[in-house]
Image: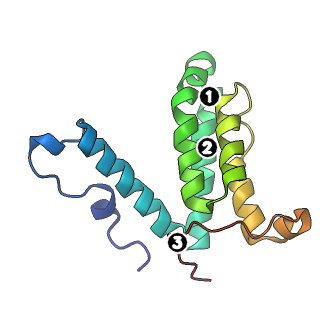
Amino acid sequence: TVLGSPLALCFPRMSGRAQGAASPAGMAAMVENVGEFVIKLSQDKWWKLFISILIDLIGLISYLIPLVAEFLDVFWAPISALLIFQLYGNAILTGVAFIEEALPFTDITPTATIGWLCEHTRVGKWLGIQPLRPHPRVQRLD
């Protein structure tokens, strides 16, 4: 299957306390594994849509807790941009996603979902921006 074992991809076996989740090596391994997981999921266009919607919904959390969440956007902006780059491999879309999440009160824009629409519908062709360049480590299945 495309997914393999999601838990094994996200949480590889750690050896010893030195590579615990709180250590820099453990965090780096976790980020790398999440990136690999997103790449594997993005090979299926419907999983890619699901991840895109999820990224956009996490960005919308700022509207639930207005002042606190806008501060948290400082941390979410680079994560969102990294995930969008992993999904679409497009520097312009990644930059727009970062700016959209970093600026206050702009989280309403569903940047990741717009990326999916540009890649998988006629909207992208109509706007002249389809197809988005796929990430070099992703092999397209469709």
Q: Tell me the SS state at disc 3.
A: loop
Left or right: 29 as drawn, with respect to 128:
left
Outermost residue on the bottom side: it is 142
Kind of residue at badge 2 = Leu
Q: Which mark is residue 57?
A: 2
CA separation in Å, label 1 and label 3: 31 Å
Residue 51 x %, y %: 56, 57
| Residue at the disc numbered 1 | 62
Identified at 54% across, 73% down, the residue is: 43
Asked where in the image residue 44 lies, by quadrant, the reply is bottom right
Decide: is 96 above or below 62: below
Residue at 86%, 70% (x, y): give it: 125
Crowding around mark 3 (Cα neighbors within 10 Å: few <14, some 14 to 19, many 20+) is: some
Type of the residue with mark 3:
Val
Measured in 3D between alpha carbons, the distance from the residue under mark 3 to the one under mark 2, in whole angstroms, is: 24 Å
Residue 87, image x, y percentages: 58, 60
Identify the disc placed on residue 138. 3
